Amino acid sequence: MIGRASAGGSADGSAATANGRERRGRVLADSQLDELREQGFYLLHGLIGAAEAGELLAETRRLIDRAPSAPRGPSDAHGDPVSHPEDYIFPLDDAGEPVLNRIRYPAWRSRLFLEGYGNPRILQAAYELYGDLMVPFDESIVLKMPHHGAGFPWHQDGNFKTGAVAERGHNFGIYLTPSAVANGAVHVLPGSHRQGILDLEAMVERHGFALPGAVAGAAGPGDANVHSRSIAHGSQPNVSPDLRVTWYVGFHHRDAISGVWDEAAIEARRLLIPIAVEARRCSGRFPNEDPFPYRRPGLQTPTPPPPPPLLRPLPQRRPVPLPAPRPATAGHQRRPRPHHPLNRPAHLIRRKRDKLCGGR
Ligand SMILES: O=C(O)CCC(=O)C(=O)O
């Protein structure tokens, strides 16, 4: 079961780690975890504070201003060089014009986003899903530009390299602006995370974007749409004058990617957590906050403890005709794309972490 499985839980809402230390202040209550497990998504109000969401929104506007002036272009609109311009994604909008809709790896581009990643409420929520075996994966900012933002066709996240298994990780879509249907809110198909690989193209051909049973909740700055990567979801273009910004941070259970990613890549990815926690702590911006108590030694644990039982099978609520499952490519060893900042040896990443606080 997700939630306190590997950590153990207690009636007062605290969670005890494997080494007996207590972390107070649950973010996701058991009933919310149950709903997430049942529906495949949960709209969590106030995951981060409105003030921090506002700061990250201002930082996003700065990143937009510093985006390549053309897809994969070497410089921004000010003529300054852009590092890794390929991390700025420009699909074509309905008029065939490229429009910026995603900035990948903001925590590696921006000190504020790195500190934001260290937010103990975000990390605590991920911990409630996967315990000490949580592993970060991609984080990116999704943008829906006013009147111009490209939509996302219905899809299930990732490429099912692990096959149609129950546990494929969760994404936290943290809203930095209000989100509503008019500015391209995400629609989800509740329960579809339990139905394997869906033929969404055929479903859209039959019904159009408005798939039967699909829902979209309104959200405000600081709220988060927590969803299984297997849930069917999509969004339409922004037809309003209001920018929509969602910062996605995702987490896997280590066992779900072991054998898919090699161990060195997994360890490198896990280091983002202590780096971000340290960056946040030594920023001095959150003096009253208890930093997320990550376990440094756990980063080198050679044999992780046995995994918790993952998603328990739930009864199908409505039969959906499934396409024949695609074969899984089990055992495929995949590394992050070469430019990924975490595709560096762990000691270089540790050095970055150690430099962050200047010895503090
Ligand atoms: O935020 C959105 O509109 C959809 C983003 C999405 O589905 C994705 O990043 O996979």
Image (cartoon, rainbow, N blue to C red):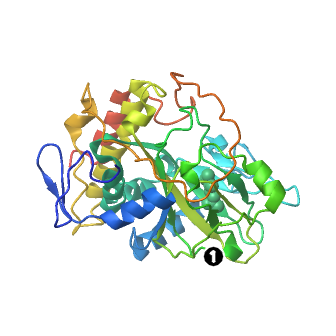
Q: Nearer the viewer, residue 156 or 202?
A: 202
Q: Quadrant of ligand 1?
A: bottom right
Q: Position of residue 152 (x, y in %)?
A: 71, 56
Q: Position of residue 182 (x, y in %)?
A: 70, 76
**Number of callouts:** 1
User: In the rendered view, does 127 fall on the left or right side of 45?
Assistant: left
User: In the rendered view, does 53 fall on the left or right side of 246?
Assistant: left
Q: Nearer the viewer, residue 221 or 191?
A: 191
Q: Position of residue 212 (x, y in %)?
A: 70, 65
Q: Residue at x 77, y 73 (%)?
A: 239
Q: Residue at x 53, y 24 (%)?
A: 330
Q: Is residue 231 above or below residue 305?
A: below
Task: Say which element carries label 1.
Answer: loop
For the residue marked with disc 1, what is the amino acid? Ala
Q: Is residue 183 above or below residue 188?
A: below
Q: Quadrant of residue 271?
A: top left
Q: Circle 1 is placed at which residue position? A: 180
Residue 91 in view in this figure: no
Q: Nearer the viewer, residue 18 or 238?
A: 18
Q: Residue at x 23, y 66 (%)?
A: 25
